[in-house]
Amino acid sequence: MAEAADIQGPSPSPARRWLRRTVSLAAAVPLLAGLVQVPAAPAAVADDATGSRTVDVSLDTLTPSTPVEGDTLKISGTVTNNGRQAVSAATVDLRVGPRLSSRSSIDEAAGRTGYRADSDPAALGGTYTFKIPQLASGLSADFTLAVPVAKLGLDDPGVYQLGVSLSGRTSSQNYDRVLGIERTFLPWQPEATAKKTQVTYLWPLISSARVSAETGSDDQQTPVFENDDLAAELAPGGRLEQLVSLGKELPVTWVIDPDLLATVDAMTRNYNVKSGTETVPGRNQAVAEQWLSSLEKAVAGHQVVALPFADPDLASLAHRGKDVSGSLGQLKPATEVAGTTVETILHVTPSTDFAWPVEGAVDPAIVKVATSAGAHKVIARSDSLRDDLSYTPTAARPIGGGTTAVVADASLSTLFQGDMTRAETSTLAVQRFLAHTLAVTQQAPDKARSIVVAPQRMPTASQAQTMATALRGLAPQRWTQSLDLIAASAVRPDPRATTRVPSTAQYSKQLRKNELPVQAFRDMKATREKLDDFEVILTMPYRVVTPMGNAISRMMSTSWRGQAPAAALYRIEVLDYLQGLTEEVRLIEKSDLTLSGRSATIPVTVQNKLLQGVHNLELRLESTKPTRLKLNDDEAVAAQPVKIDGGHSQSVKFTASANANGKVPMTAQLYTEDGKPYGKPMSFTVKVSEITPTVMLVIAGGVLLLVLAGVRMYSQRKRAAARNAEAEAEAQEETQDETQEGAGAADGTEAAEDDDPEQPSDPTPDTGPESGGGSGPGEKVDR
């Protein structure tokens, strides 16, 4: 944890752990499906590979893509026999024409399969063919055609259909016939047009969310990445590397997610990556530095548009987030930080005045949300904002409320969404793109218009390469010229173009299906509220607020579309991490207490395991039986402020006064300065053993009696000792007298004693202490 001093936080609740496991398993299903696949059946010859679909004709290269007089058109490709019989005496021919008069005719021709005798022209023939003597079933052969443009029969400028066919024989039908054909388009505009179509091409630099809410406990707050997969996209040949290396030479408007820049910028320094339950150091700093350096050079002198941070899903926000209070408020901070991030890292000033809903699909709710954070221009698409015109109108048009919709051309914007790793797919897409742009110009040759192309948000490397090839085809600018997005949005709108935003009911059901659920916005709200409560107690809130705020923005990223389990798991982990941080400031459990006496002190300990201090906290202690035990000046509830340095504990003491014996349940609770409870309450019991005044008198009387008894016993023993000393003195005197009498007997007194034999000697002691008999009347004997 960033602030927990490497101390393990509390475990999530059982319910949350169960949800996390469920989401993790759901997120792993696609991976498992990819790892454990049912082996595909061996490729077989198609049952319908008959007639003019027997042979597949693939056009791999066509140069030049927009020829002029004097050029030689070169076409190379591959033919594959998908039929069950070998093809003999095969000839690959070029068929030129007809000239197509509209954009719809281009799309119609592109959708045709098989040879059409009524619409496909005759083969050019002559020396401009390629012979294949034998083509066995299931085998392929390469071909190359080279034809001078002058021999193509191109007359007026325009878009010409170009067909490459294979004619040959089979054993069942031993005569020449067309067995396969592929069509493409050849734009023919050798001279510059009087009016040119202005083309704005958006070049998106967007990726998925990579950074977690966690940061290191060091001063630099080392970020923790969910994985290190971004490095592969930044490395040479990677998706993002290709976008930068190709885009720097193209007339494009860069559309950038600031979160991507912030993520790569973080990678240039120390960063950690999750690995199971641990984190390991990331090691791709050099790759990140090189990519950022290349990007900074590439965007210099180009127009840059910054999307709100983490590219929020505007449609989900409009359709689902509106039901959760506070959700719309998250868009403004994401927009505000966008410009600062781009300017700080790339040293260019971007425009933050554009909103880009998913696939340019809009309705009133989306437009309202898109402009709520300050944007005045919405990038829409012509399959959402439809025009009923015979020509393609200028992209910009007002849609009310001071908002401009910049309507991208749907056909051009979706041309490069397929698998462009195949040479044929790429070549056909390029030629179709160039044909459409020329057709737009020729729709109204006396009227210059502005069109916008908004491709998929995250093009693959091969898609980026194909787009770059198509834009290079426009480089001669014979019928187009480039224009940046800001200038395109300011072009005078076509008065006939629609300005009516389609209703919510007309919004695509498929797009709505992939929107973030309402629960996603509930999770964001819970996380934001907990962060707000946590922020007020921190002495260095930026250490938590900034990474957590960015994580909340990432929760509503457009990149989560189609990844519901992974999105839910990310939200759970962010909330759990924040919960763990808040629980590092808590009350220490307290055992029951016994109070003996009328008043005492009750200590309650608050622990702060964060690395930073906390303040603006108040600890309240409540007595549930104030008639028995009161706190601080006869109150049922006592409160004291709490301020603790990081990694320390504080013992808060409360004065209590007892009025009666018994048990008193006590509750301690932390509160923020705005009166909100913080953390869990802590309960304990105080047992009161009260001592009343009467009991005190009884005890005092008993003590007095004991003292008097002790004094009496001391006096008695002192007097007894005195008597004993007196008796001993008398005994000594008697002994001396007897000695003297003995001496007199020697002189004649003994005879007198012998004269009285009936008086025996008395063996009984004369002194009281030595006598075992009772005392005489009036005697006082110490025992």
Image: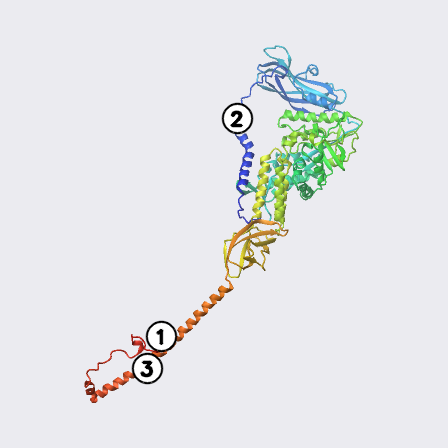
Res. 782 mark? 1
Quarter of the image where one finds residue 549: top right
x then y, percent, for residue 540: 62, 51
Q: How far apart are marks 2 and 3 (CA)?
A: 126 Å
Nearer-the-camera pick, 532 or 662: 662
Which residue, given by chain and number where applicable, does mark 2 sit on? Answer: 38
Tell me which amino acid carries mark 2. Val
Which residue, given by chain and number where applicable, does mark 3 sit on? Answer: 729
* Mark positioned earlier in the residue sequence (2 or 1): 2
Q: Is mark 3 on a helix, strand or loop?
A: helix
Q: Can residue 64 be seen in this view?
A: no
Tell me which amino acid carries mark 1. Asp
Figure check: 383 above or below 586: above
Figure check: 390 above or below 263: above
x then y, percent, for residue 257: 66, 38
Tell me which amino acid carries mark 3. Ala
